Each structure stands twice: as C-alpha cells, then as structure tokens.
Amino acid sequence: MTDRFRFLVRYFTFWTALFVVARLIFLAYQHSAATGLGARTLALVVVHGFRMDLSAAAYATVLPGVLVVLGLLVPPRAVRRGVGVYTVAVIVVVALLTVGDLGIYEAWGYRLDAAPFAYLRTPVEAIASAESSPVLLFAVVAGVFAAVAIVAYRRLVAPRLDAGRRPTALGAAIALVATAALIIPIRGGLQWTPLNQSGVYFSSQEFANQAALNVPWNLVHSLTTAGATEHTDPYTALDAATARQVADSLFAASDTAAPRLLTMHRPNVVLIIWESLTAKVVARLGGVPGVTPHFDSLTHEWLFFDHFYASGDRSAKGLVAILGGFPPLPHIQIMNEPNRAAQLPMLSRDLRAAGYETSFYYGGELAFANIKSYLLDGKFDHLIGESAFPKSERNSKWGAHDQYVLGRLLHDVGAMRRPFFSTLFTLSSHEPFEVPMRPVFPGRDVTHEFLNAHAYADRSIGAFIRAAQREPWWDSTLVIILADHGHPLPELPLMHGTAAEARQHIPMLWLGGGLAPRDSVVDRFGAQTDLAPTLLAQLGLPHARYAFGHDFLARDATSFAYFSYLDGFGIVDQRGSLVYDAVGKRVTEQAGDVGKPELRAGQALLRLSYQAYLDK
C-alpha cells in the first residue's frame, strides 16, 4: 500500500541531495570567493538555498508521481522504464546546466538564466565567446556528476519502484495525494507569495545570494516569467511622483554652459568603442602596468576622463547606453526588442540630421546580439561588418582582428563626406582572447590571455592614432575612445570603493586636432549614458530627448554615475559608492559616505527607466 509513497519520498530526497551537491560544486569552483565568505555565511548559503532546492526537487518529482498513479492502468514495467528514462534525461540536463553555470558566472557575475539564450542566434560567436572557459574540465565535471547520479538513482532509488505488480487503488490514491502535496515545496511553503529569488537572498554580499540560487530553478523561472513584467514596473520602492522629482534634480538643466572644448563648429567625430577596456588594465587608473602603454601615453597628451563608468555589463547594453543614452535594465536587453529600441534617441540619427555622414565598423557578425537591427534603426549610412573583409583578414574566431578593421576605417575616411561620424567597435579583446602577436605577458591562463588581448588592441589603436595624425582630416576631427563595458578580469586587490565600482570603472579619452584642451584631466563622475548628450551639447545640438543622461561637463551638473545589473543598480559619486539589490531590497555593497540621497537617486532611475521601457 505504501511502497509507491516510499518510492516518491526517496525520489524527492534524491533530487534534493543532487541539487545540494550541484551547489557545492559551484562553491568549490568559485573557491576564492567562497572562502572569502567565512564558514558561517557558507553554511547559510546552503541553508537558505535548501528551500529552492526543495522546490526544484518537487518540480522534478511531479512527472514520476503522475506515472506512479497511472500504474493502475499502465503495466508496472512500463512505469519503471518511463521513470528511469525521464530521470536519466533530467540528470544529464542538470549536469550540463551545472557546468554551464560555472562558465556563465565567471564571465558575467551572475547565475545562469534566460539571458545567454539570446546569443544562440549567432552560434559561431556564442561558441567563440565561451572558448576561454576550461571546456575539458567542465566536460569531466559534467560526466562524473551525471554518472555518479545515474548510478545512485539505479542502486538507491529505482529498486524501490516495484516493477512486478500494480499498485492497489489505495496505494495509487496515496501516491496521488503525495504528488499533489508537492505544490507546497514548489511554492516554497504555505505563505501567500510563491517562492522567488528574494526568498533565498539573505546577505549583503552579492556572491552569497547568487550562490544560494538553484540553477535549474533559476533558469526555468527566468524563461517562464520573461514576459511577466512587460506591462508592470516592478521597481516601485519610490512612488512615481517622488521618483520624477529626484530624477529632475539629478538632470536639472544647467544655468552655466560647459566649457567649450572644440576648436570648430562641426568637427568630424570618430568613436572607438574598445571591447572590455576596464580601468584595471590602464596603469594611470591603478591597473596592471604595461598592458596599454600607447593608451596610457595618450592620456597624458589629451583630455582624459578618470571617473567614468560603464552603464551595464555586456556589449549590447553598452552600445545602447553609448549611442542611445538609455541605461540597461535588469533582466531586459532592449536591443533584442527592435520596436522598442527604435523609439529611443540615437546619436547617429541626430548627427545625420545635422549633416554628418555616418558609418559603423565592426570586424564580426553584425547580427550578433541583434546589433544590426539596432544600427539600421540608427540610420547609419554605411555598415561594415565581417563580410566586408577578405578571408585572409578574418583570422579571428569572431571575424577580422582590430588592426584590419582600424586599417579599413583609416582607408575609407579619405573618401567620406565632411563632416563624418564613424563608430568603430573592436573585438580582439573579447573571449577567447586569441590575438595575432607574440604574448607580452607570459602565462596561458585566462587572465594572461586577457591582458595580452588588450595589449594587442592597444597596439592596434596606437598605430591607428599615429597614422591618423598624419592625415589631413586629423586637424578637424574629434576622436573618442571608451569601453563597451568593464570586466571581472584581472582580479586585483580592492584598494577603495566597492567591487562593483571597480568592475564598472572604465576610461574615456578625447583627442584629435578638433579638440582644444591638451594634457588635461576631467575628474567629474559620469557614465556611458552621459556621452551622447555631452557630445551633442559640445556640438551645439539639442539633447533633451536623452532623458537618462546629461551634459556632465556643465559646471553645475550633478557629478555621479549610475549603472544597473541583473538584479539592481549601483551609484558612484564624490562621496563614495553603493550597490542595491532590488530583489532582496537591501544595499549589498557600500563604501565612503554615501547614504539615502544616493539610494533614492538609484531607486528613482531604476523605476523611471523601466517605466520608460514599458511606455515605448
């Protein structure tokens, strides 16, 4: 009578144990971060995460529970075989998700969810992006994990499901009640609100909260709720009126114009977006010496911005922030929604309307991350992607290396109508960090490959600048160099501020014959969303549509930088920095004298930017 019930209990326990082991694998792989938590917090990671493990185990048990009940009608051997095939299949999927999550977290700083699936539209680039991960190690871990789990199931659990006789009606009824009762752990308990990520978040340390998540649960939840907030703003810590008041004070129109930096009314503009150019590879910003010597030298000759920050953490987010002045949103990549993205302001459209010939250069596949549709909406006159380069120059897994793309731009500029606006997006410093030059830094680990990739990008950009200075158009041109986003690598000791601040900190450099200041530093705080309105203000063009950025060079402009990430935001200003987790509703990192004003500023911008997205 109770044998089927006992099987379901053991089956549920098996999955719960498996998910606990998966979490321990994550903690072991991220041992540096894990040991920094301390023994008590590590124990709490397992304790708080156990609730989500129970939920995931309950989900995995539902189908076997149904099959057990159907044993009244289906031959017992067929039931046992069906449960066995299902279990092995799910074990393999969980093993693959477990190792995939290891690479995702190392690269992106958060657990596996629906976001990476957007990149599967361009599989070659997606594979290249993952090649810096230790694929062999991951394959071994997945294989061992799956094999041990399958053996454990077959020896400890499967024998409990009697294949020799049908269950009694009472036994089937008990199994049905047990299966129905799985709704309790699925919901995370008897409380009114079903389990979500905030139910396992418990710490002010972001890694601890991320480690408490169950990856299969997190992924399925992300996939199934992707459209749940398409009509409702979930970030309502401040009411709408207060949020608007706070934002208006941040972006108040300046009574005093910014100092004039340009030598002419309409200079040409070349915008170089350097893949992953983190401050941690720029010596002048306290980064590893010798990685970017050409860039470092240029910072002493031209106008250097040393308190500048990336608005997001991925290229697609950075491009929208730089060109469209729109901040990234948690769990949303607006570039993947062309209808909404097309309604944002865009620097290329504004400059084209002002008489500029516009072009965009990229050595890779323009369809990657839906970049092409975004650029087409930006009305660029010319789009130059991977197919524009001969096969001999497409010697990177991503396409054409930086030296060839920069060389193509240098060649084309002479024929461009004046004034021109050309954007170039580099790629050689993207994973897998393979570049066509001898290593500058010995070592074959991912950190040294990252440093060598930036050394190559620096060499390529330095050569381009030197060649451009000999061209007749140089004296009427402004060149802007900045990153698309920061990067977790290289891992350096945190000297000040928060870890998120260090990750988002990027350099920006203005140079060229069209620029008046030389050997100067701007120490005001700004973010990528400020670039478009600041540049347009320098050109004397309207910029009011860029509602989430401002001319941060104006003398009385608020000096701050806002960035967002998967579950919240960060604020940096002259008082310090803080990071807020919008799911757990708590400050997770804080440094300096920051407090309520910075918190309210971030909450206001998060609410209003999400509402602006909904209104598109």
Image (cartoon, helix red, strand yellow):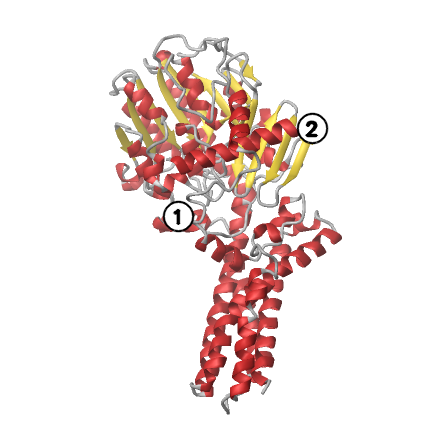
In the image shown, does 191 or 251 lie closer to the viewer?
Answer: 191
For the residues marked 2 and 1, what is the alpha-carbon distance in whole angstroms? 38 Å
Front-lying residue, 57 or 39: 57
Residue 427 visible in image: no
- Determine whether the residue tagged by mark 1 lies in a helix, strand or loop: helix
Q: Nearer the viewer, mark 2 or mark 1?
A: 2
Q: Position of residue 64 (x, y in %)?
A: 49, 75
Lower sequence index among marks 2 and 1:
1
Residue holding disc 1? 119
Q: Which residue is mark 2?
A: 592
Considering the numbered disc 2 on the image, is that residue within a helix, a strand or a loop? Answer: strand
Above or below, 562 relative to 465:
below
Q: Residue at x 67, y 51 (%)?
A: 34
**477 vs 44: above or below:** above
Position above or below: 308 against 147? above
Residue 377 found in image quarter: top left
Disc 1 residue type (three-letter): Tyr
Residue in the image at 53% along x and 73% along y: 179
